[in-house]
Image (cartoon, rainbow, N blue to C red):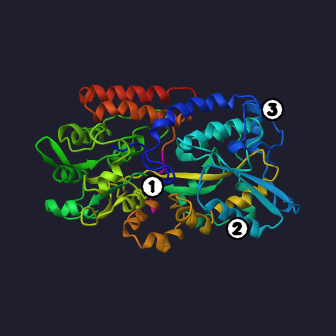
Amino acid sequence: MAIPATPASLGRRRFLGMVASALVGSAALVACSSQSAAPAAGNTPAPSSAAPTAAAGAPTAAATTSSAAQPAATAASQSNEPITLIWDTFRGIGTPWPQHMIDTYVKQFPNRKITLRPIPVPGGQQEAYPKMYAMYAAHTLGDNIAFDPSHWEFYRAVPQGILFPVDDFVAQDKLDLTQWFKAFIDMQHFKGKMWGLPSWGWTGVDGLHFNEIALQEVGLPVPDQNSPDWTMDKVREYADKLNKKTGNQVDRYGIDLSLGAAGVTIIARAWTSDIISEDGKKALLTDPSVLPAMQWIYDICQTDKVDALPGSIPSGKDNALFSSGKIGVLQGGSLSVTELDTAIKDPKVTKLKSVLFPKRPDGKRPNQLRGGTWNVNSQSKHPYEAWQFIKVLSSYDGILTFNTEGDNGALTRPDVLKDKFFTQNPNFMVFLENLNNAILAIVPFNAHGTEYETTFTQSFANVYLGKSDFKTALQTAQNAVQAVLDKPAT
């Protein structure tokens, strides 16, 4: 069973274990005093962005309004004096990519320096945000930062005034926003303003990765994703036929579904619906439009019993089992292409073929845009210079090397996908269709995104594990998710 998907630098299935504690820790640390907050990675000097524009602690309503709405600096106001920008990041650390970006920027602006301060995240990305909130409250957060939309913190950082709006910079530089896929630019907008440029990104766990060797063994053709015969019922049929048992011993699981919120959203969208309402206020698990998707999951897991459920396989071993021929088809996205190719050791046992989910009646394929953003700290003394750095990070070279050097999945620019890193693997090209037709994620209106995903994953387990009857289990999950969405906005 797959848990919520994450950027490649974290691994596909490492996110779930720490999200709940991170949410609680984030709220606590934002309220910490400046004495209790410390810069990441043991750096003690305050960065150049540490202008005392507000009192330490969580911003007041007045401070939030002031910092979020402040006018953007102009190019004419940029300093020609030597300056140092502070880059606080957890992305690409331990790879050559951050230094590559710094060198590129400094080559363009020799009078500037960038100090890289890695943010340690031993348990995963979500550990970074409590530290960053605390550093902002203490006025020690760097000039360049990242509050990712798909990890929900973007929607908390903007109302708190942490990010600097970049609309005026975009206009003054006449920046061509068509360099990026439109959906990733749309993702940078919130509350009527634009807050950054794209970093990592993909279209979620919107693919089905087949083992061609297993298909040949059972006499099934590789699915034609453009055929009208490629339906969700056909996916279930393939999973059933790919399942292989010797007595009570499972030799190969027919399918490995992604059953966290991100994966189940894809399945719900296959029925032209979603698991929460468009306004982010209502859980829809028991809605008549969603019930066929929930029933489909239950039938595969409990009626057919062909899914690799928790307890039946070791946690986090999905890719290894697929590569060794123990899983017939795995639900995953474009990030899984590299992971699975790397994991496959014997092409006589496993050969990867990726296809998209079936088209819906409206002609779209189910997907859910996942992505990140590079931001400027609203407290920065040099916002325009910091903006110039995020343009480097999000440039063609920045995004391409984010993939090739930085161990991240960044499919945010069409021109990058023309590089041989992608074109030499036809399984990558499958996902181009969804990148051009991406469906945005629905954001919980109260900004409790992390808690929403954690609660969904925990409560929905009762459905696919069959711990109670389908109707009761689904209603229990519905109630649990709705309780989170009913909480006051943060």
Mark 1 and mark 2 lie on one chain; the one further toward the N terminus is 2
Residue 232, disc? none
| Residue 298 in which image quadrant | top left
The amino acid type of the residue labelled 3 equals: Ala
The amino acid type of the residue labelled 2 equals: Thr
Q: Badge 2 is on which residue? A: 104
> Residue 232 versus residue 102: which sits nearer the camera?
102
Query: What residue is at 26 percent from the left and 65 percent from the top?
Result: 224
Magenta region, residue range: 436-441
Query: What residue is at 33 percent from the left and 27 percent from the top?
Result: 475
Q: For the residue labelled by badge 3, is the local secondary structure a helix, a strand or a loop?
A: loop
Q: Badge 1 is on which residue? A: 203
Prevalent SS, magenta region: loop
Mark 3 and mark 1 lie on one chain; the one further toward the N terminus is 3
Q: Badge 3 is on which residue? A: 55
> CB under 8 Å between callouts 1 and 2?
no
| Furthest residue toward right | 81
Quarter containing the N terminus: top left
Q: Is residue 304 left or right of residue 176?
A: left
